[in-house]
Every structure is written in structure tokens, then in C-alpha cells.
């Protein structure tokens, strides 16, 4: 009987994650306590099954990566921030690839390009969403190069 009660109490005390990982903001995640963040990291891993890097990571490592990505991009959704952190070299991201991305991917690409262009005062001063919009417009005008090259034109 004690074992049954202990199991029931453990299940009740376990963090339940009710937010949609696709729309959860970094501000929401960063405001969570440790068990909430762990649950959010597990949910993010489940939502990013198309990303081999994420699926290969342990749940705790996904939570750590999400926290780091959100620290760099606090106004983004967690998924966009994580995707931005997974773009390892924004200097090679092509306009063709960016224009083929979904909204989360484009936001991630814009944030990665902003990080890559941190020495450009104009780009650094822009909000992540504005950089994404500017990068999309630059790529539509100059679709054959890299996003960073298009942004410089």
C-alpha cells in the first residue's frame, strides 16, 4: 500500500508540460523552475524530431542547449532560437536555402545571420524579426548568393 501511495504522489509531483513547444517563447521558458525547464527541454526534443543533432542529444543536453539559445535570443520562440543555434556557419547559408524554409526556419536563419553580422552596427541594432524580414527581402532581390552577401548589397 505504501508503494502504491508513493507512486501516486510521485506522479502527481512530476512536472506536467502543457505549453506548445512550437510557440513557447524563450521568456516563458527562462521563467520556469528547474523541473519545468527540464520538461520543456524534453518537449522541445520531441518537437524537433526532424533535427538529427537534437534527437541525438540527451534530454538534459537539449534543455541546456535551449537555455543557451534563449539567452542569446530572448525575444524568440524556443524552437527558433534553437534552430538558430544549430546553424553553425551563417556565412555559408544560401538565399535559396533560406527562402525554402518555413517560418521558424527563416526566423532561425535571420537570428544566425544577425549573430554572424555582429560587427555590422546597423544589423546588430535591429530586432531579430526585423533582421529576418530584411534578410528575406535581400534574398528575394539577390537570390543566387549567401544571405550575408545579400544583406551587404
Image (cartoon, rainbow, N blue to C red):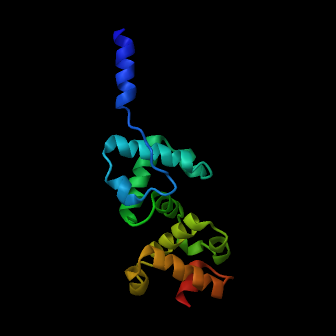
For the question of whether residue 137 can be seen, the reply is yes
Which residue is located at x 41 percent, y 81 percent?
Answer: 126
138 horizontally vs 9: left or right: right
115 horizontally vs 146: left or right: left
Q: Quadrant of the C terminus?
A: bottom right
Does 151 appear above or below 81? below
* Quadrant of the image occupied by residue 28: bottom left
Q: Quadrant of the N terminus?
A: top left
For the question of whether residue 61 can be seen, the reply is no
Which residue is located at x 43 percent, y 53 percent?
Answer: 65
Does 50 appear above or below 91? above
Tell me residue 39's x, y (percent). Answer: 42, 42
* Quadrant of the image occupied by residue 68: bottom left
Which residue is located at x 48 percent, y 71 percent?
Answer: 111
Tell me residue 44's x, y (percent). Answer: 50, 49
Tell me residue 114's x, y (percent). Answer: 46, 75
141 horizontally vs 20: left or right: right
* Quadrant of the image occupied by residue 15: top left
Of 125 and 1, the residue lying toward us: 1
Which residue is located at x 41 percent, y 38 percent?
Answer: 16
Tell me residue 143's x, y (percent). Answer: 67, 82
Amino acid at each position: 500500500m505504501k508503494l502504491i501511495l508513493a507512486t501516486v504522489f510521485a506522479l502527481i509531483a512530476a512536472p506536467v508540460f502543457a505549453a506548445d513547444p512550437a510557440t513557447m517563447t524563450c521568456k516563458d521558458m527562462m521563467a520556469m523552475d528547474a523541473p519545468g525547464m527540464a520538461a520543456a527541454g524534453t518537449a522541445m526534443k520531441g518537437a524537433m524530431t526532424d533535427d538529427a543533432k537534437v534527437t541525438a542529444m540527451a534530454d538534459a543536453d537539449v534543455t541546456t542547449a535551449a537555455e543557451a539559445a534563449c539567452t542569446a535570443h530572448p525575444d524568440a520562440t524556443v524552437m527558433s532560437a534553437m534552430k538558430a543555434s544549430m546553424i553553425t556557419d551563417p556565412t555559408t547559408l544560401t538565399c535559396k536555402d533560406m527562402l525554402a524554409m518555413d517560418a521558424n526556419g527563416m526566423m532561425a536563419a535571420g537570428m544566425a545571420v544577425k549573430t554572424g553580422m555582429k560587427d555590422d552596427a546597423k544589423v546588430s541594432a535591429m530586432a531579430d524579426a526585423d533582421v529576418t524580414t530584411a534578410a528575406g527581402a535581400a534574398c528575394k532581390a539577390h537570390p543566387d548568393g549567401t544571405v550575408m552577401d545579400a544583406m551587404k548589397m
